[in-house]
Image (tube, helix red, strand yellow):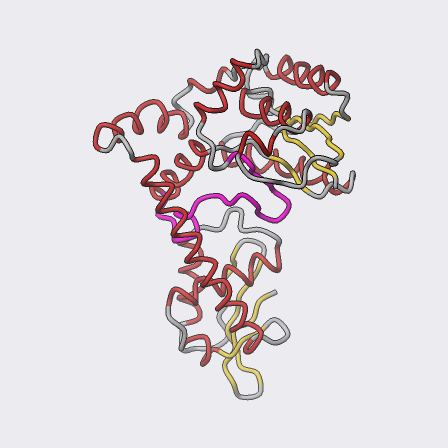
């Protein structure tokens, strides 16, 4: 097995690299994994959004050499205007390297605190159940072994092991939504409920378990009613709204590979299209186009 480790140079990814390289990850996270005989590679994406970006890249390159691991670096081709653009550019680079090097997984250092921030941001954006369930440990080739580990535990490990890491200067810039949430909003939430972290993670776990059930129902339904990129609207209209939404998401993720950029409001627009009694209408959803039409006298929902 080959694992590509995404290393920014910050404490989280440095600890992940150290644990994987020294074959101690299983002990740290508290359960067994098949990572002891893996080939490891290191990748760093330079966002070029602050003056220390090149220094961070050099730091990670030296770190990879310390562990005697192959190193890959990528740079932003244009000025990144948002957190979403930066995230997409980074994953595009990581996926390119993963495919080229035939890696099985991309190891990411997202931890429990990141999960909480993600759920809060999804809630503020009006996300559906998928967004409120947060990230998953394994999503396609993306692997997040720290997802249930609090940031404090990672920082404590780095201190005890005297690991060197860099601090991204943008981490204190509150023009970024995550920083504002982390530094201003969440401490106030803690005054309402000091155990809010555990409460949110528990809700997310329940949400993911519900999504697993819904996913199974959707898969079974699509096997019965979807043929050649079309479904009969009569059968689709009979579904509960929750299943309709997941049918659209599964069609999209299967065709495109992920749901990046697809929000709940976009799904609702496609559902509105399906509910239109007139045929021949169409709606763009990310990289797909959905259309209602008639085939053999039957109203259908198609996509391409």
Q: Which of 129/277 is in front?
A: 129
Q: Which residues are magenta?
A: 125-146
Q: Which of 163/218 is in front?
A: 163
The N terminus lies in quadrant: top right
Question: Which secondary structure type mostly characterizes the magenta part of the structure?
Answer: loop
Residue 3 percent across, percent down from the top left: 70, 37
Q: Is residue 22 magenta?
A: no
**In the shown orientation, is residue 117 left or right of residue 85?**
left
**In the shown orientation, is residue 111 left or right of residue 92?**
left
**In the shown orientation, is residue 288 left or right of residue 212?**
right
Above or below — where is 63 with respect to 13?
above
**In the shown orientation, is residue 198 left or right of residue 225?**
left
Above or below — where is 8 with respect to 143?
above
Outermost residue, left side? 192
Above or below — where is 26 with respect to 289?
above
User: Which quadrant of the view contains residue 214?
Assistant: bottom left
The C terminus lies in quadrant: bottom right
Q: Which of 226/41 is in front?
A: 41
Residue 286 percent across, percent down from the top left: 54, 53
Residue 64 percent across, percent down from the top left: 72, 20
Q: How many marks?
A: 0
Outermost residue, bottom side? 297
Q: Is residue 133 magenta?
A: yes
Q: What residue is at 40 percent from the left and 77 percent from the top? A: 238
Residue 194 percent across, percent down from the top left: 26, 30
User: Which quadrant of the view contains residue 16?
Assistant: top right
User: Which quadrant of the view contains residue 25?
Assistant: top right
Q: Which of 125/116 is in front?
A: 116
Q: What residue is at 42 percent from the left and 19 percent from the top? A: 173
């Amino acid at each position: 097995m080959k694992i590509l480790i995404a290393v920014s140079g910050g404490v989280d990814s440095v600890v992940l690299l150290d644990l994987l390289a020294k074959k101690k990850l299983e002990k740290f996270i508290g359960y067994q994994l098949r990572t002891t005989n893996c080939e490891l590679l290191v990748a760093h994406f330079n966002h070029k959004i602050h003056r220390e970006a090149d220094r961070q890249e050099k730091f990670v390159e030296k770190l990879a050499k310390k562990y005697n691991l192959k190193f890959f670096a990528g740079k932003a081709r244009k000025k990144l205007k948002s957190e979403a653009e930066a995230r997409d550019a980074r994953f595009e680079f990581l996926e390119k390297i993963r495919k080229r090097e035939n890696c099985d997984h991309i190891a990411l250092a997202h931890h429990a605190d990141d999960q909480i921030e993600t759920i809060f941001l999804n809630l503020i954006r009006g996300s559906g159940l998928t967004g409120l369930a947060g990230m998953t440990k394994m999503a396609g080739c993306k692997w997040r072994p720290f997802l249930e580990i609090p940031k404090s535990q990672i920082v404590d490990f780095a201190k005890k092991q005297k690991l060197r890491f860099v601090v991204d200067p943008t981490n204190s810039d509150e023009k970024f939504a995550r920083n504002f949430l982390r530094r201003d909003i969440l401490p106030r939430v803690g005054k309402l409920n000091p155990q809010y972290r555990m409460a949110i993670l528990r809700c997310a776990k329940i949400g993911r378990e519900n999504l697993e059930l819904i996913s199974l129902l959707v898969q079974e339904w699509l096997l019965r009613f979807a043929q050649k990129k079309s479904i009969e609207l009569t059968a689709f209209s009979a579904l509960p709204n929750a299943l309709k939404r997941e049918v659209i998401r599964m069609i999209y993720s299967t065709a495109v590979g992920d749901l990046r950029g697809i929000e709940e409001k976009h799904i609702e627009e496609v559902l509105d299209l399906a509910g239109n009694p007139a045929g021949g209408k169409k709606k763009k959803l990310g990289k797909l186009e959905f259309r209602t039409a008639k085939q053999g006298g039957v109203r259908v929902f198609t996509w391409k």
